[in-house]
Amino acid sequence: MKRRTFLAAGAGFAFGSPLVAAVKQNKFNAAANVLARATSSGQVEAASLYVRHSKTVFTKSFGKAGSKDAIFLLASISKPISIAAVMTLYDRELFDLEDPVQKFIPEFKGDERDRITVRQLLTHVSGLPDQLPENSRLRASHAELSQFVGGAIRTPLLFEPGTRYSYSSMAILLATEVARRITGKPIAKLVDESVFGPLDMKHSALGVGRLQLDSLMRCQVENAAPESGAGDPSTKDWDWNSVYWRKLGVPWGGAHGSAADVARFLEAFLRPEGKLLQPETARLMIRNHNPQGVRPRGLAFDVGPGLGGPKGSERVFGHSGSTGTLCWADPATDTVCVVLTTLPARAVKPHPRNVTSKHVAEAVS
């Protein structure tokens, strides 16, 4: 991007002329108005929107998000962020996608586990479950990340590896455990050193890291995902807003970040320059790896029209999160869209994040 144009909440316009300003403002007004109405009505406590289309950037904050740098719990947008850190080890030839997971985690054996490859972990075809049966018990006891890893190593498989798709947070966890065993570094440290640092993502952390707890947007836990407590008052010491969960930094859903930082991350794949990964590795992460008839997935990225990008765009990539977040990038229209909210994804349909995304997609199509 040679030149950027910003629209920040309450900051007015900085375009070349009043006419150009009006045209560019109207382009994303419909998207912004969705979040403005949702926050003014009280449905959503806080939201942030970041859109870049070609050389134009539009960014605005809403409700309790006081600035464009407001920091949200990203939920499953954490997955591609964590795996990007893992893939820096692929660039160093420290593992191969076809390596069996057992090569790095010897105790991962029995019940066909020896057949599971690193690639299968990253594309959700390993047979591992999304959450552990003992998830609530572990969280209620404030278990360490290593205890979740132990559970993921032992938990029964849902199906024969490679035969079908089933979204799996535990598979992503074990992929990051492979990286920990290779490097000896906790995944939060590896992400900070290999992703947030090189991309200058100053308002992001896996867990809390250098961020201030009181700077994080509160999640509206009512109607939240069951594995996060679903708003039950008895789960307050381990739900999304608890100090325990914020600091734990689970690689499948514990990253925090601003909309602009998430956009920086997507740009590293839309326009790979080698700051994060070798360009060919970045492109590898955003292409489909699953066979025909199985839901398309990149390496931890969701890919394809199902993300809700511009109509007809087949190369869209990104991810959504159960805390009410959504992001995508589209090479065909040179667009990045990030919508962060505090309203759980399952709380209402259609969710404001999806309606906002749809308006952005229509504006750039």
Image (cartoon, rainbow, N blue to C red):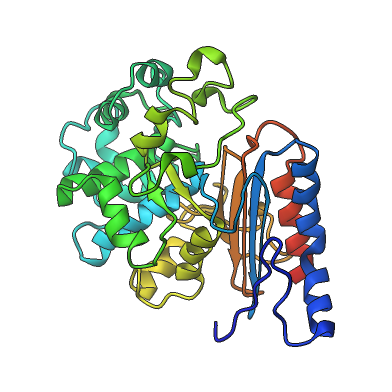
Given residues 290 and 13, the one toward you in this image is 13
Given residues 40 and 354, the one toward you in this image is 40
Given residues 150 and 265, the one toward you in this image is 265
The answer to whether residue 316 is visible is no
The vertical placement of 55 against 202, above or below, is below
Decide if residue 309 is on the left or right side of residue 95.
right
Count of labels in the image:
0
Classify the position of the C terminus by image quarter.
bottom right
The quarter of the displayed image where residue 358 is located: bottom right
The quarter of the displayed image where residue 10 is located: bottom right
The vertical placement of 229 against 114, above or below, is above
How far across and down, in percent of the image, does residue 162 sit? 41, 42
Q: At x 36% / y 60%, what residue is drawn? A: 196
Q: Residue furthest top?
A: 234
Decide if residue 183 is on the left or right side of residue 341.
left
Q: At x 38% / y 75%, what residue is drawn? A: 279
How far across and down, in percent of the image, does residue 346 sit? 66, 32
The quarter of the displayed image where residue 360 is located: bottom right
Decide if residue 361 is on the left or right side of residue 133.
right
How far across and down, in percent of the image, does residue 125 sit? 44, 42
